[in-house]
Image: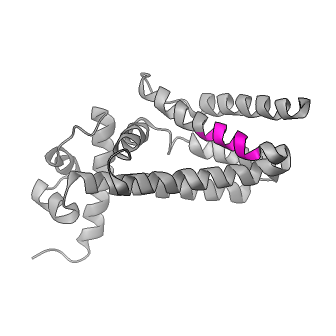
Amino acid sequence: MPKLGMEPIRKEALVKATIVEIGRVGSLDVTVSQIAKRAGMSSALAHHYFGSKEEMFLAAMRHILTLYGAEVRGALAAAEGPEGRIRAILRASFSPGNFRREAVSAWLNFWVLAQSVPEAKRLLAVYQGRLQSNLVAALRPLAGRRAVEIAESLGALIDGLYLREVLKSGPPDGAVAVAFALRHLEAELEQGVGE
């Protein structure tokens, strides 16, 4: 007989184990058995809760996206002015909680999965849409009609910095990534002034 109240705890353990295993291996080439073992349970129980490795991975990405969204909302609530809002989004994107080896590996695999799995594609579109709208809202007072273009370039730069991080060794350096993105932002805004 299953213990009452254990399902959410076990699901959370499996989600976290999925993220850790993908980060350890660097790809989706992990088994349900490896994930379950890391979570301290049987693979049969993992299958019972999620049905497949794909569902576990989608749950892990929902978890990562939920944490990211909460961090962005908190950072935006404390931000002052349009530039402060942009800085808040960038800092949240590269915070230690979001820009860690396991999460970076999960993102890389998420982009690949989105090419063939409709639910992953939908989740990615939701993330990209929210990032774009937050950036455009902050950029409009600073860049006017160029806000959409600059927001797209910042979104691409964020994605690119995650992709490049996968190829590096050692822990990700969020401060360097934020500084790089801010230099890009400043160059874009200066370009607009010169036009």
Image coordinates of residue 19 in percent, x first then y, are 33, 46
The answer to whether residue 19 is above or below residue 169 is below
- Identify the magenta region: 147-155
Image coordinates of residue 11 in percent, x first then y, are 28, 62
As for residue 130 lying within the magenta part, the answer is: no
Tell me what residue is drawn at x 76 percent, y 51 percent: 138
Image coordinates of residue 134 in percent, x first then y, are 67, 54
Tell me what residue is drawn at x 41 percent, y 57 percent: 62
Colour option used: one colour
Q: Is residue 144 left or right of residue 1?
A: right
| Most foreground residue, 116 or 104 | 116
The answer to whether residue 1 is above or below residue 187 is below
Majority secondary structure of magenta residues: helix
Tell me what residue is drawn at x 16 percent, y 64 percent: 48
Q: Is residue 49 left or right of residue 188?
A: left
Give the farthest residue toward the right.
194
| Most foreground residue, 131 or 36 | 131
Kindly tell me whether residue 43 is visible in this rendering.
yes
Q: Quadrant of residue 78?
A: bottom right
| Most foreground residue, 5 or 116 | 116
Image coordinates of residue 20 in percent, x first then y, are 32, 42
The answer to whether residue 43 is above or below residue 101 is below
Q: Quadrant location of the C terminus?
A: top right
Kindly tell me whether residue 63 is visible in this rendering.
no
| Most foreground residue, 40 or 157 | 157
Tell me what residue is drawn at x 72 percent, y 51 percent: 136
Q: Is residue 105 left or right of residue 14?
A: right
Q: Quadrant location of the N terminus?
A: bottom left
